[in-house]
Image (spheres, grey):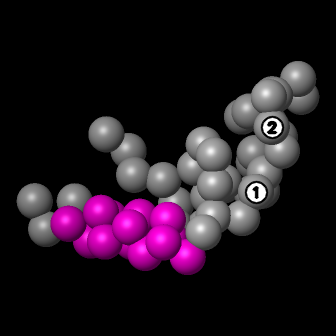
Amino acid sequence: MKVPNPMGCRQCGIDHRVHAIQAGSGGTHTWEQPTEQQIKERMQTRRTEKTR
């Protein structure tokens, strides 16, 4: 499982700079900043994945 970038979209985790390309021009949402809780959880998960 690929852990999203901590600053990836709140809804899908895709990085802001490539969100329009990967989510598609007819995507169901626009990029939204993740919550502080999401950022924290993503960072912790990435750290855990590196130690495995």
Q: Which mark is residue 43?
A: none
SS at mark 1 in the image:
loop
Q: Is residue 50 visible?
A: no
Q: Is residue 21 left or right of residue 4?
A: right
Q: Is residue 47 above or below residue 31?
A: below
Q: Which residue is mark 1?
A: 32
Q: Residue at x 49, y 65 (%)?
A: 38
Q: Residue at x 66, y 54 (%)?
A: 9
Q: In which quadrant of the rendered view does residue 12 lie? A: top right
Work out whether residue 42 or residue 20 is closer to the camera in this orientation and state it.
42
Work out whether residue 24 or residue 28 is closer to the camera in this orientation and state it.
28
Q: In which quadrant of the rendered view does residue 24 lie? A: top right
Q: Tell me the quadrant of the picture where the C terminus can be found.
A: bottom left
Tell me, yes or no, whether the two marked residues, 2 and 1, touch with CB atoms within 8 Å: yes
Q: Which mark is residue 29?
A: 2
Q: Position of residue 19 (x, y in %)?
A: 75, 45
